[in-house]
């Protein structure tokens, strides 16, 4: 593949940016997640083409985690290769995040939220990605055993060491989030962002009061799994395709697609058609129109899929009484 020169019109092509809480950070409304399609089992040329397309269209935020792949660590290795091949001249235009919290290596120190694990994991992530710092480092999940103060102080010290510019948390319960906001603010390392699963089928962050708290406290919110691992597309409206993720019965189980859910998906698809959109476009647009949402994380298996996802940016607001 030829030497990469970013599109000079990358910031004039329709991407819009939202302020992340009460911070100086602007995030693209659509961010690119590396959970799937950037691992060691994936064709690097395709991963590279997706990342190039994203940046050429104003997506400055690449979201990773230590265990993304498969195998674990390989998405970050892909990011390191992308830095060498394409993106090092543009490092200061990129907002790169990674996380630690799930099992990463054997033994008692490769999991959860201890200071030892978080700091060791980030050092490994930086080596894999071939960068000196990340823009954002997350605690990937709540640890019910480790004292919150230990996890949070590790995040503070990671910023003070210059290994991350900002910190975030993902999938913490409301009461722990309240502790985090207060603890980090008191130590001059304010919580930048909360990452949670929010989509048309799973509104738990809203129901639990997390999005309201984030907005009140000036914390950004970014949604992962916005299409419910493909349920909120046209893939399953007529059952389970043979080549679908659900047929592989790994992350998305076949017994999820109940008659009740299928009826719900068909209703949502009818609403989308009435708006002149696909179900996926509407599902992404709905998230972006929710109070307090900064960005939505999308995955992509091709440039064409990413192109379709970007249409949500220009989608019309939802009319009063429009049932979604």
Image (cartoon, helix red, strand yellow):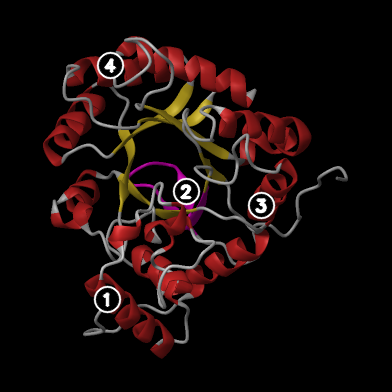
Q: Which residues are magenta?
A: 17-32
N-term-proximal mark, 4 vs 3 = 3
> Between marks 3 and 1, how big is the CA–CA gap?
31 Å
Q: Residue at x 30, y 31 (%)?
A: 190
> Between marks 3 and 2, how big is the CA–CA gap?
22 Å
Q: Residue at x 76, y 49 (%)?
A: 6
Q: Is residue 318 visible?
A: no
Residue at image mark 2: 26
The spot of residue 28 in percent (x, y) is: 50, 54
Residue at image mark 3: 50
Q: Is residue 20 magenta?
A: yes
N-term-proximal mark, 1 vs 4 = 4
Residue at image mark 1: 264
Q: Quadrant of residue 93?
A: top right
Residue at image mark 4: 153
Q: Nearer the viewer, mark 1 or mark 4?
A: 1
Asked if 32 appears above or below 171 in the picture, the reply is below
Q: Nearer the viewer, mark 3 or mark 1?
A: 1
């Amino acid at each position: 593949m030829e030497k990469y020169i970013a599109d000079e019109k990358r910031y004039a092509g329709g991407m819009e940016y939202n302020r992340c809480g009460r911070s100086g950070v602007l995030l693209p409304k659509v961010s690119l997640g590396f959970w799937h399609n950037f691992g060691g089992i994936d064709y690097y040329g395709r991963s590279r083409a997706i990342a190039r397309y994203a940046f050429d269209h104003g997506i400055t935020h690449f979201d990773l985690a230590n265990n993304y792949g498969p195998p674990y660590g390989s998405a970050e290795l892909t990011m390191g290769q992308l830095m060498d091949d394409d993106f090092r001249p543009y490092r200061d235009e990129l907002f790169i995040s990674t996380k630690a919290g799930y099992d990463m290596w054997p033994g008692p120190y490769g999991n959860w939220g201890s200071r030892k694990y978080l700091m060791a994991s980030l050092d490994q992530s930086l080596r894999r990605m071939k960068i000196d710092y990340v823009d954002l480092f997350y605690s990937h999940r709540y640890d019910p055993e480790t004292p919150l103060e230990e996890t949070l102080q590790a995040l503070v010290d990671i910023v003070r060491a210059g290994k991350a510019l900002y910190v975030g948390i993902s999938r913490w319960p409301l009461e722990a989030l309240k502790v985090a906001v207060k603890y980090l603010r008191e130590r001059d390392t304010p919580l930048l962002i909360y990452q949670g699963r929010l989509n048309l089928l799973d509104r738990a962050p809203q129901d639990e009061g997390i999005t309201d708290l984030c907005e009140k406290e000036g914390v950004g919110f970014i949604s992962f799994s916005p299409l419910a691992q493909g349920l909120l597309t046209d893939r399953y409206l007529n059952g389970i395709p043979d080549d679908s993720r659900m047929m592989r019965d790994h992350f998305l189980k076949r017994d999820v697609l109940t008659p009740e859910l299928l009826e719900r998906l068909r209703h949502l698809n009818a609403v989308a058609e009435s708006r002149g959109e696909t179900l996926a476009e509407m599902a992404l647009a709905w998230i972006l129109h929710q109070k307090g949402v900064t960005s939505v994380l999308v995955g992509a298996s091709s440039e064409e899929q990413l192109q379709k996802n970007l249409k949500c940016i220009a989608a019309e607001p939802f009319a009063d009484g429009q049932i979604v």
